[in-house]
């Protein structure tokens, strides 16, 4: 299943990108007016939340069948277990390297800037509760999160990692059956195309969802919350910019000048992830754009869903940055050996958490407990977490896009650039 770009689809994509940016700007203005005029009420927030919820639920209804169909077809067309293992190994090696760099970058920047020094803890008393429950990140829990008991259950809960595990087995089985499974693979190929068509239809609702989401957050918190934490947020976004630069350089080392075209190709799903603070919302569009860029469907449909569980670069950088920030705010001095231990722990605990609501905060809560840092310190982050999540989600899309393109290149499955028509 290969998506082909056309002048018409390209113009529609550009129009949608412009509409999302306009909605983002109007949302900030509308939220500020509601907040400053005292017109924002819980009822208004609930009404705006309905619009965002509808869009995110529409996206979630697409993801499970899309991942299953495209992944099975991709693996079935690979033909043998050796190819699947080779592609999987290359993807995991890239994920591990990117994860380490992301965590290390967050650790270095938070020690350089020390944003937690001088922060008031009036809103984060030791007896307060953040409302975020630390996950039980044991090996048993990880295995339970990894291996599905039922495909239907995994699809109902949108457990991408579990769907990937089943799809790998099913795809290998179809490859082994050869001609006997050809009709089934063709049907699933059609399902994949249909789900991408549904994605294009759902995407036109995105500007309304972006408008509602941004209006709700700014209307509730006001622009003042951004001013209060302005230094912390600006330092974090500087880290995001540096991580993008590192990903660009790493991509350039392997893809050459085509990395510029790659970043342009995924600008729309990246903007969508930023505006909705959900990298999951951008998954279908990211897959389509990567195929238009030239990535092989068999590689993209395998690497991208894996990346959504194992390669959340923006979220991982935030984990080290935020954890040490809270320690600094409490005046807790973490030695370099403790911070190195924290990095290694987060290398493990951050994997497979994509299906957990507010995953980054859950991982941070668990990490705080292991280093005896007051869990109430999360209250320092909750007010601005949505604005930080916007940057994390956009970075997750960029990181997984680069990973997919790189693995496609390593496999010799990256199509040459098509001449401009």
Image (tube, helix red, strand yellow):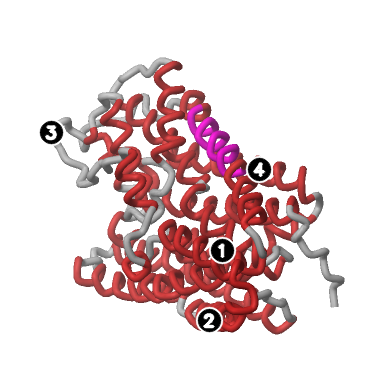
User: Of discs 1 and 4, which sits in the foreground?
Assistant: 1
Counting labels gives 4
Q: CA distance from mark 2 to mark 1?
A: 19 Å
Q: Dot 2: within a 10 Å radius of its alpha carbon, few (fewer than 14), some, or many (20 or more) residues?
A: some
Secondary structure, mark 2, is helix
Which residue in the structure is indicated by mark 4? 245
- Distance between mark 3 and mark 2 Cα atoms: 52 Å
The answer to whether any part of residue 75 appears in the image is: yes
Q: Nearer the viewer, mark 1 or mark 3?
A: 1
The image shows residue 96, relative to residue 275, as above or below, that is above
Question: Residue 207: percent from the left, percent from the top?
Answer: 47, 74
Secondary structure of residue under mark 3 = loop
Residue 172 is marked as 1
Q: Quadrant of the C terminus?
A: bottom right
Determine which of the numbered discs, if any, sits on residue 139 in the image.
none
Task: Assign a secondary structure to mark 4.
Answer: helix
Residue drawn at (49%, 51%) of the image: 391
Closer to the camera, 282 or 116?
282
Crowding at mark 1 (Cα within 10 Å: few <14, some 14-19, many 20+):
many
Residue 238 in the image: above or below residue 60: above
Q: Please report the residue visible at 61 percent of the width from the left and 68 percent of the height from the top.
A: 175
Callouts 1 and 3 close, C-beta under 8 Å: no
**Highlighted range, magenta:** 94-107
Which callout, 3 or 4, points at the residue further toward the start of the chain? 3
Q: Please report the residue visible at 46 percent of the width from the left and 35 percent of the height from the top.
A: 347
Marker disc for residue 191: 2
Mark with earlier residue (4, 2):
2
Q: Which residue is mark 3?
A: 127
Task: Tell me: 405 left or right of 45.
Answer: right
Check if mark 2's residue and mark 1's residue have beta carbons within 8 Å.
Answer: no
* CA separation in Å, label 4 and label 2: 37 Å
């Amino acid at each position: 299943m290969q998506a082909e770009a056309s002048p018409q689809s390209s113009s529609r994509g550009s129009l949608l990108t412009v509409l999302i940016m306009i909605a983002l700007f109007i949302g900030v203005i509308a939220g500020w007016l509601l907040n400053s005029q005292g017109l924002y009420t819980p009822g208004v927030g609930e009404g705006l939340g309905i619009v965002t919820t509808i869009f995110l639920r529409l996206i979630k209804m697409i993801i499970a069948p899309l991942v299953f169909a495209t992944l099975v077809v991709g693996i079935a067309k690979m033909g043998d277990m050796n190819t699947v293992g080779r592609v999987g190994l290359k993807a995991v090696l890239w994920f591990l390297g990117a994860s380490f760099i992301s965590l290390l970058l967050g650790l270095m920047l938070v020690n350089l800037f020390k944003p937690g020094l001088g922060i008031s803890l009036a809103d984060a008393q030791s007896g307060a509760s953040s409302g975020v429950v630390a996950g039980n990140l044991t090996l048993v829990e990880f295995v339970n999160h990894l291996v599905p008991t039922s495909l239907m259950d995994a699809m109902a809960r949108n457990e991408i990692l579990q769907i990937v595990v089943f799809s790998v087995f099913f795809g290998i089985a179809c490859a082994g059956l050869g001609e006997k499974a050809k009709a089934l693979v063709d049907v699933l190929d059609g399902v994949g195309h249909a789900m991408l068509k549904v994605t294009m239809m759902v995407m036109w609702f995105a500007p309304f969802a972006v408008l509602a989401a941004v209006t709700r957050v700014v209307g509730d918190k006001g622009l003042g919350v951004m001013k209060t934490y302005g230094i912390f947020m600006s330092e974090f976004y500087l880290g995001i910019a540096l991580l993008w630069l590192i990903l660009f350089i790493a991509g350039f080392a392997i893809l050459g000048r085509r990395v510029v075209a790659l970043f342009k190709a995924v600008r729309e799903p990246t903007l969508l992830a930023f505006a909705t603070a959900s990298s999951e919302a951008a998954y279908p569009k990211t897959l389509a754009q990567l195929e238009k860029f030239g990535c092989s469907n068999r590689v993209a449909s395998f690497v991208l869903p894996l990346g959504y569980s194992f390669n959340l670069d923006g979220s991982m950088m935030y984990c080290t940055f935020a954890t040490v920030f809270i320690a600094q705010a409490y005046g807790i001095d973490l030695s370099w050996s403790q911070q190195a231990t924290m990095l290694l722990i987060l290398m493990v605990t951050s994997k497979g958490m994509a299906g957990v609501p507010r995953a980054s905060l859950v991982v941070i809560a668990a990490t705080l407990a292991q280093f005896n840092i007051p869990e109430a310190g999360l209250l320092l982050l909750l007010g601005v977490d949505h604005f930080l999540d916007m940057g994390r989600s956009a970075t997750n899309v960029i990181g997984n896009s680069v990973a997919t393109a790189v693995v496609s290149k390593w496999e010799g499955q990256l199509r040459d650039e098509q001449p401009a028509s």
